[in-house]
C-alpha cells in the first residue's frame, strides 16, 4: 500500500500556540469537530510516519489547537511548523456518495469529455459555494485552469486511475 493510500491528510500545522507545547492546526476536513475524536496522529519525517498521541483538542474559530502527549514546551513543537497531520485511512470517516478525500484528488489528471488533457490537480480550495480544483497545465506555456467542482462541469471522478473528466462551460479556459 502506498503512502498516499495508507494515510490521509487531515490538517496542516500553522505554528506553535502558546508556551505549553500546543500547535495551531488548519483543518483540511469538512468538520473540525472530527478532531475531538482523535487519539493519535502521524507526522511525516522523510519516508517515515511517526505517531504522536493526542493529549487534548480545542477548537478556536476556524483552527484546531492540539496538544501532543509528552511535548510540553513551545520549543518541542517548533519544528512541526508547516507539517501536515495524517491519520490511518482505516480510521477515516466514511464518505457520502460523490464525496472524495482532498488527498485522493491531488495529482489526478484532468481531461475534457472530448479527451483533451488539461493537466493535473495540484490544489483544492473552497470558494464558498463550491470547491475549486486548481489544475496545472502539462505544458508550462499554457495557463493554469480553475475548475469549479460542480456537477455541470465535473462529469466523472476516478480516484483509482487518478482521472477527472470535465465538460468545460464557456469562459473556463
Image (cartoon, rainbow, N blue to C red):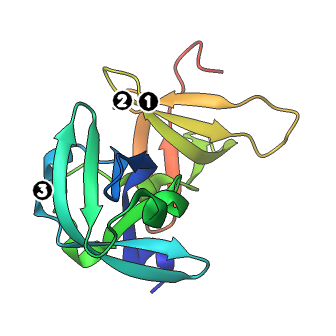
- The front one of 70 and 105 is 70
Outermost residue toward the top in this view: 171
What residue is disc 3 on?
36
What residue is disc 2 on?
150
Badge 2, how many Cα within 10 Å: few under 14, some, many 20+? Answer: few
Q: Is residue 150 left or right of residue 40?
A: right
Badge 1 marks a residue whose secondary structure is loop
Question: Does 171 sit above or below residue 23?
Answer: above
**Residue shown at 37%/67% (left/top)?**
86
Q: Nearer the viewer, mark 2 or mark 3?
A: 3
- The front one of 155 and 146 is 146
Q: Is residue 102 left or right of residue 44?
A: left
What residue is disc 1 on?
153
Residue 47 picture quarter: bottom right
Quadrant that contains the N terminus: bottom left
Question: Does 11 sit above or below residue 48?
Answer: above
Residue 129 position within the rendered picture, expressed as x and y whole percent measured from the top left: 31, 20
Amino acid at each position: 500500500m502506498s503512502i498516499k493510500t495508507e494515510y490521509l491528510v487531515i490538517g496542516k500545522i500553522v505554528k506553535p500556540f502558546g508556551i505549553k507545547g500546543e500547535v495551531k492546526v488548519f483543518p483540511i476536513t469538512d468538520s473540525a469537530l472530527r478532531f475531538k475524536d482523535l487519539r493519535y496522529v502521524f507526522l511525516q519525517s522523510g519516508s517515515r510516519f511517526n505517531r504522536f498521541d493526542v493529549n487534548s483538542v480545542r477548537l478556536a474559530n476556524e483552527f484546531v489547537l492540539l496538544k501532543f502527549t509528552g511535548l510540553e514546551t513551545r520549543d518541542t513543537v517548533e519544528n512541526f511548523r508547516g507539517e501536515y497531520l495524517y491519520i490511518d485511512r482505516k480510521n477515516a470517516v466514511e464518505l457520502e456518495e460523490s464525496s472524495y478525500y482532498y488527498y485522493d484528488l491531488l495529482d489526478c489528471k484532468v481531461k475534457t469529455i472530448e479527451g483533451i488533457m488539461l493537466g493535473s490537480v495540484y490544489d483544492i480550495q473552497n470558494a464558498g459555494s463550491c470547491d475549486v480544483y486548481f489544475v496545472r497545465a502539462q505544458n508550462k506555456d499554457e495557463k493554469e485552469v480553475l475548475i469549479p467542482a460542480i456537477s455541470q462541469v465535473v462529469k466523472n471522478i476516478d480516484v483509482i486511475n487518478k482521472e477527472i473528466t470535465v465538460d468545460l462551460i464557456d469562459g473556463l479556459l
